[in-house]
Each structure stands twice: as structure tokens, then as C-alpha cells.
Image (tube, rainbow, N blue to C red):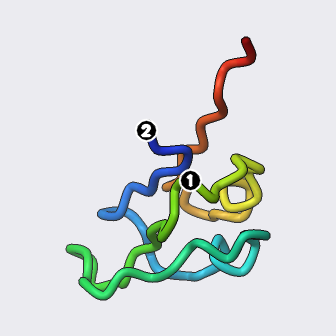
Amino acid sequence: MEKRVSFAAERCKGCELCRASCPKGIIVMAEQLNAMGFHPATVLAQEQCISCGNCYRMCPDTVITVRKEAKK
């Protein structure tokens, strides 16, 4: 399964705005630190992502990519 939402962890500043905006509550902050010393955002359950784009719109650093399935 292709990821529905992905994060450029190396650029994430850990502001948690994406986490707060996720209606499914599947975004968490990673335990490891990125090169800038922040806990980057990540997704717990890709299969629960509805590709709503809330996280993408909230991110001040544009580190999030949201993919939607092509309509058949």
C-alpha cells in the first residue's frame, strides 16, 4: 500500500499543528530526533488516513505530502 500521507522528517520542527488537525488522531511525534533536534511527526496507521489534507494545510513548513487514490 502506498503511503497516503508522508512527512519530510528532516525538515519537521515538531510544532504538532498537524497532529491537532487530524480528525482520525493518527499523527504522532516520533521518539527519535531529526538532525535539527526536533521530534518529527509521523503517522501510526496509514490505512486509517482519509487523505483529508488538514495536516497539509496546517503545516507552516510544508513538510507534508498527501496522496489521494485515483478515481476508477
**Circle 1 — which element?**
helix
Q: Residue at x 70, y 47 (%)?
A: 51
Judge whether 10 appears above or below 68 on screen.
below
**Circle 2 — which element?**
loop
C-alpha span from label 1 to label 2:
8 Å
The x and y percentages for residue 19 are 63, 77
**Amino acid on which the number 1 mark rests in the picture:** Glu
Q: Of 71 and 11, which appears nearest the observer?
A: 71
The answer to which quarter of the image holds residue 21 is: bottom right
Q: Of 31 and 11, which appears nearest the observer?
A: 31
Tell me if 65 is positioned left or right of 33 in this view: right
Judge whether 13 appears above or below 54 on screen.
below
Judge whether 17 appears above or below 3 on screen.
below
Tell me if 56 is positioned left or right of 39 in this view: right
Which residue position holds label 1?
A: 47
Which residue position holds label 2?
A: 1
The x and y percentages for residue 44 are 48, 70
Q: Residues within 10 Å of mark 1 (few under 14, many from 20)?
A: few
Answer with mark 1 or mark 2, whichever residue precedes in sequence. 2
Mark 1–mark 2 CB contact (< 8 Å): yes
Q: Residues within 10 Å of mark 2 (few under 14, many from 20)?
A: few
Q: Residue at x 45, y 82 (%)?
A: 29
Q: Residue at x 55, y 44 (%)?
A: 4
Tell me if 56 is positioned left or right of 34 in this view: right
**Amino acid on which the number 2 mark rests in the picture:** Met
